[in-house]
Image: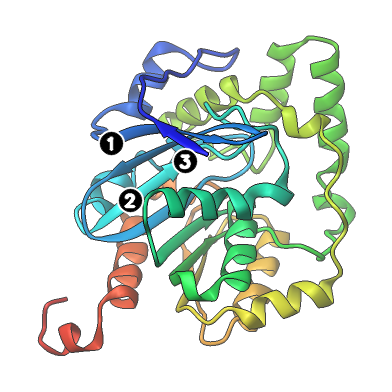
Amino acid sequence: MEAIERPVSFGIGAGGGSESLAALTRGREGQVQVLRRDGHGELVLETAGKGEPLVLIHGWAVDRRMWVHQLPVLRRRFRVITYDRRGFGQSTCAANLEHEVEDLKAILAHLAVPKVAIVGMSQGGRIAIRFASQHPEWVSALVLQCPSIDGLVPPPADNMTPLMDELARMLRAGDRDAFVQRLGAHVLLDPGARFTSARAEIMAMLGDYRGEDLMAPASPEVRIEETFEQLTRIGAPTLVITGSKETYWLRQVADYTARNIRGARRRVIRGGRHFVNMTHIADYNRVVLDFLVRATTPWSERALGSV
């Protein structure tokens, strides 16, 4: 395993454009590194700020740019680590959920991080849960934004399998324009009509989404009993957050997650959908920052009034 530093850049896909991509990278001052994973490919990661380590794990079909509105706030208090998961963004490792806990371990080992706070969004929340349950000694705090979890079977109306199959057919047919537009129209990827800036930012990321995971073998099925055991093994202070306009199913998943992690807090941001961090930026940042600062600050410092 080897890490190198070199310039990396996003392409402009069917849904992207120079203005949207510029908006996503404006004001970034991070250090970008490429971490080679032997036998797999490369992971692209970025660090910014100083303080306690904090890693942000993006959701499905997007990349690390989804955190652009959180970085200016979080890097004032934390050493923030963002990265493109395998199969997404600029990373070249083949998409495979089963390798992602090891990827996160490799990133933290490379950066010499002994303990870290984690924010995981949607599918990134699933990875955060797996990591926190397998390696509780490495996790100081956990924020799960509209997490997806193993083992819970959604009702037909919320089953993503038909959409995944349709998108895979479009990719095989070489119709990227239709692929991006169909994906961007789905309720999970649509931030709402009035959030035009967030819409442009999401579409820019979807334009660069390669869809490799749609062609990959399905992950092994996990029983809900195993997921329950995962949740009960998590010992870090945990916040589970959704928008009030998140899909009913994912709000139910968030409720289940919060009920089964000892001491977890549950917060709802009024009016937010799946990408609540990109639409209700001030509310989201305030809730997350307040939780993380308190969760990662020793009681002695809190008693002295430093937070």
Question: Disc 3 marks which amino acid?
Answer: Tyr
From the viewer's perspective, is residue 246 above or below residue 226? Answer: above
Label 1–label 2 contact, CB within 8 A: yes
Residue at 59%, 64% in the rendered image: 131
Left or right relative to 223: residue 28: left
Tell me the number on the disc at residue 83: 3
Front one among 242 and 88: 88
Q: Dividing the picture into quarters, in which one does residue 225 lie? A: bottom right
Precedes in sequence: disc 1 or disc 3: 1
Question: Disc 1 marks which amino acid?
Answer: Gly
> Which element type, helix, strand or loop, lies under badge 2?
strand
Q: Where does residue 278 sit, x and y in percent of width and height?
A: 43, 43
Question: Disc 2 marks which amino acid?
Answer: Val
Q: Dividing the picture into quarters, in which one does residue 244 lie? A: bottom right
> Which element type, helix, strand or loop, lies under badge 3?
strand
Extreme residue toward the top, this view: 174
Answer few, some or many: residues within 10 Å of disc 3's Cα (few below 14, many 20 plus, some between 14 and 19). Answer: many
Residue at 71%, 27% in the rendered image: 211
The residue beneath circle 2 is 80
Residue at 59%, 26% in the rendered image: 206
Quadrant where the C terminus sits is bottom left
The residue beneath circle 1 is 30
Front one among 305 and 156: 305
